Amino acid sequence: MILKYDLSPENQALLALPSGEEICYCVPFDIDERGDFLDDSYIVATRKRIVVLSRGARKSQYMLSDCEKVASEPQIDCGLFLVKTGGEERILARFSGKHLSRFSYVARGLMMFLSGNMSLVSSDEYERTCPKCHRALPGTKECPHCSRQGGGTTKQFLSMLTPYKKQLAIIFGVMALAAVITLLNPEIQKHLIDDVLHDRRGTLPQAYFFLSIIFGLSISMVVLNITKAYLCAKLGSTLSKDLRAKLYHKIQILSLSFINDRRPGELMNRVVHDTNRVKMFMEDVFCNMFTIIVIFIFDIIYMLILDAKLALISFAFIPFGLILSTAFKKNIHRRFHRQWQKDDDVNSSLQDVISGMSVVKSYGKEASEAKHFNELADSYAKINRKNEVFWAIFFPMLSFAMGAGVYLITYFGGVNVLNGRKTPGELLQFINYTSMLYMYLNWLTNLPRQLMNLVNSVERINDVMSQEPRIIDREKAADLDIKGSVEFKHATFGYKSYKPVLEDINLSIKPGEMIGLVGASGTGKSTMINLIMHLYELDDGELLIDGRDIRDIRLENYHSQIGVVLQETFLFSGTILNNIKFAKPDATYEEVIRAAKMANAHDFICRTPDGYNTYVGERGFTLSGGERQRIAIARAILNEPKLLILDEATASLDTESEYLIQKALERLTNGRTTFAIAHRLSTLKDADRLVVIDGHSIAEIGTHNELMEQQGIYYKLVTAQLEMQKV
């Protein structure tokens, strides 16, 4: 994101900054007081002042030393940039939604500067833009808009084929040989008719000779077609397999923000269906495409050489086919793109219902969900039916119009034979070449449909592959044997950059401390946990682990030293043993049992039908909530974590299960740096320190007794819970 736009000489003259005073931020705004769009308007900030320039005039100026607050407030599809001076807020600029991130960054930088926590320096690399169309590129290597222009999808598909050059070379060789044999056949037939059969000029051995050549060429074509189909099927399967593996790996390393913005069914379609369409294209279309294109080109050349006049009559129908195909190209792309979108909707709905079937059944919503799914399926079927009807009408009409040329060639060619200007063999040869031309032209007119399938699938695959993970290992990232020290320094973060969830967080945790995070819903407790787990990165400030920036620690090494127990325990389909070993796949059986005993899980596991080899089903549905939670604790214990995250680990459990889990957690937290969020504040009273978050920042810090004595936010929360328990 550009935060320092160049001003015109006229605006620079209006600014009239004293010598030595440097512009730090210069950003445009585009809405006036009446809500109309405007241009040539800027907010300019230096280390001393904020100046408003608009349409050739200097509107206002505020000294930073007089500002109590600088803020960017998001509105509906727009925002306000304001300052507070003398206890009064003043709106300096109004701007459209595309500038929200930019003004939020500027306001945050100015406030940090006013508090003395940072120097006022802007960065022009905050967000990348496309050099061609200047659109924002949020997390992608390539502009999605420009990639569709100038053969972008073709380049993407060719890049997918690059690793298979040797296989492609062999396939092209087989295709070329098949094209030569196909073009040679009419020539042999001409000699058989003119030199042997016409007027009984030839002998029986000569007839056998030509027939044997034709038979040999036919056998060769069968062998070549089988070989070609086998090689293309093998390449298609390999390419599809490799694309699935790459997509799966890419989805694994992409940031949670990308995953959360996509529906599960949509991502599954990219991995399964789109890669399968690429495979089908290689097997059904690419297998013949090069052969047909070569035949089509040389067929035209031969026809011109044999009889230019008849060839021109044949070619008169070609522009009609090409114009018709080109005219419907965008229409075909749009039709099939909508069809794939509806397919995504159907798969996503199915995924949601199957995953949440217990909720559907508990509310008795089977009928309504079935109705909703049927509506989506009907919508998909209607679009699919319309597309198939369109193609069923379009393609035969085009084929008939193109094939009409054969009748004209037969008529005019027959006249030439009767007049003695052409032999019967030459006429048959020309008719064969003409039929071949129209047959392959019909195939080529059907090609746009296959290409649109490929284009849509390649675009959807590339949409994932072009994404850049926002959290990656830096070049200097290294392994670190974590001791447990954690420190936030002026940390600010928001899932939307213009809407911070946490602002200016300063907190230092010693190794082995247990920190309880307290606050109302939506204040940022879970967000703080997500930052510590390095699932997201700070917008501003630093997060230090043992004095080292968390971004300088290798991700795999860091995550291997974290243990996590969440309220919503997720178990994979499989055995209890595999679920516990997920944190440490190479763990021995004895280590698993020891972890299960520490988690108070061993006894109930032994009572299951197959013990540790008991299959738990999708999301562990065969186990109770407390049993799932204890398996999650065993999984965390097995990893011997240096940092422990407990997010509502005992919520929604019965008294006995909570007691067993609480005892297991006491063993787990002993000697480890622990961050805990709990619905029942009584479970946090033994924490070394409690951090109360309110208004997106830290409001109180202290032990349970210290905070109760202060009678602040924590005191009110505890009192409210006690009153609720009495009720």
Image: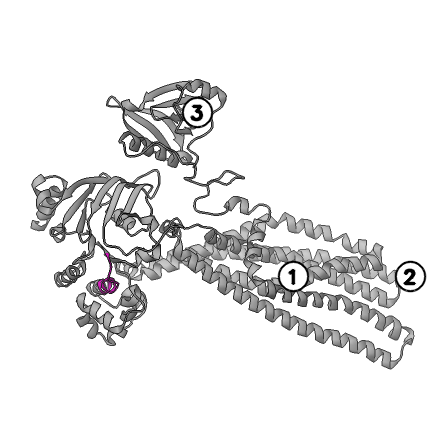
Q: CA distance from mark 2 to mark 3?
A: 81 Å
Q: What kind of element bears circle 3?
A: strand
Would you say the residues marked 1 and 3 are in contact, meaning their CB atoms lie under 8 Å apart?
Answer: no
- Compare residues 66 and 708 and report the one nearer the observer: 66
Q: What kind of element bears circle 1?
A: helix
Callout 1 crowding tier (Cα within 10 Å): few <14, some 14–19, many ≥20: some
**Could you tell whether 477 is left or right of 627 in the image?**
right
Would you say the residues marked 2 and 3 are in contact, meaning their CB atoms lie under 8 Å apart?
Answer: no
Q: Between tags 2 and 3, which lies in front?
A: 3
Report whether residue 374 is seen. Answer: no
- Compare residues 650 and 373 and report the one nearer the observer: 650
Residue 483: x and y, percent? 23, 54
- Does the magenta-highlighted stretch encompass residue 7? no
Residue at (44%, 58%) from the top-left corner?
A: 377
Q: Main secondary structure of the magenta part?
A: helix
Q: Amino acid at mark 1?
A: Met
**Could you tell whether 717 is left or right of 39 in the image?**
left
Residue at (45%, 30%) from the top-left corner?
A: 5
Which residues are drawn in magenta? 631-642
Q: Which residue is mark 3?
A: 41
Label of residue 289 in the image:
1
Q: Which residue is mark 2?
A: 421
- Whichever of callouts 2 and 3 sits on the residue coming sooner in the sequence is 3
Callout 3 crowding tier (Cα within 10 Å): few <14, some 14–19, many ≥20: many
Residue 51: x and y, percent? 37, 22
